[in-house]
Amino acid sequence: MDKETQELFKDILAKRLSELFTEAEKTVAGMTDTEETFPDPTDRATLESDRNFILRIRDRERKLIMKIREALQRMDDGTFGMCEACGDEIGIDRLKARPVTTLCIECKRRQEENERARGM
Ligand SMILES: [Zn+2]
């Protein structure tokens, strides 16, 4: 991968990362607001399930934030865009669709087949 392409992906990842932080901050701020607006026990149940929902989203956000950080780290290491399993280059189109991926399309397909075979 040439320097220019790598810079492009660095930009994409950095933007996504700051978006995620903004979203996460909003989520936390939202939780505090709702808690004060609905002190009624009936609303409390809804609030609890809402909060579980929010926590699930935040967990996914957290995981994505970690993945983006790892991708940025791989850029520093010079291994970004290389398949973790076979060492081949991951296609640019695949990276554009999913910049945090660590597997080429072929290895990803094999991994998914294995997971299906194990009933995951
Ligand atoms: Zn591969």
Image (cartoon, rainbow, N blue to C red):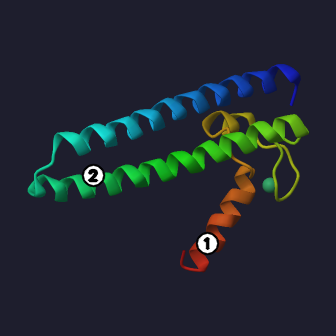
* Amino acid tagged 1: Glu
Is 36 placed left or right of 64 in the picture?
left
**Residue beneath the point at 40% across and 40% down:** 28
In this view, the residue in front, 71 or 81, is 71
Q: Name which residue type carries label 2.
A: Asp
Q: Look at the image and tell me in which quarter the C terminus lies.
A: bottom right
Q: Is residue 16 above or below residue 61?
A: above
Asked whether residue 80 appears in the rendered view, the answer is no
Asked if the residue at tag 2 contacts the one at tag 1, i.e. Cβ–Cβ closer than 8 Å, the answer is no
- Ligand 1: does it lie within 8 Å of the C-beta at label 2? no
Q: Is residue 46 left or right of residue 110?
A: left
Residue 105: mark: none
The residue under the point 39% across, 39% down is 27
Q: Which quadrant does the N terminus fall into?
A: top right
Local SS, label 2: helix
Q: Quadrant of residue 8?
A: top right
Q: Residue at x 69, y 37 (%)?
A: 95
- Whichever of callouts 1 and 2 sits on the residue coming sooner in the sequence is 2
Q: Position of residue 46 (x, y in %)?
A: 18, 55
Mark 1 element type: helix
Q: Which residue is mark 2?
A: 50
Instruction: Give 87 or 77, whichever is nearer the viewer.
Output: 77
Expressed as whole percent of the image width and height from the top left, the position of residue 49 reads 26, 58
Q: Nearer the viewer, residue 64 or 80?
A: 64
For mark 2, does the 10 Å Cα neighbourhood hold few (<14), some (14 to 19), or many (20 or more) residues?
some
Q: Relative to the observer, which residue lies in front, 85 or 26?
A: 26
- The residue that appears at 41% across and 53% down in the rendered structure is 55
Ligand 1, by image quadrant, is bottom right
Disc assigned to residue 115: 1
Distance from mark 1 CB to nearest ligand 1 atom below 8 Å: no
Q: Position of residue 41 (x, y in %)?
A: 12, 57
**Residue that protrudes farthest toward the top in the picture:** 4
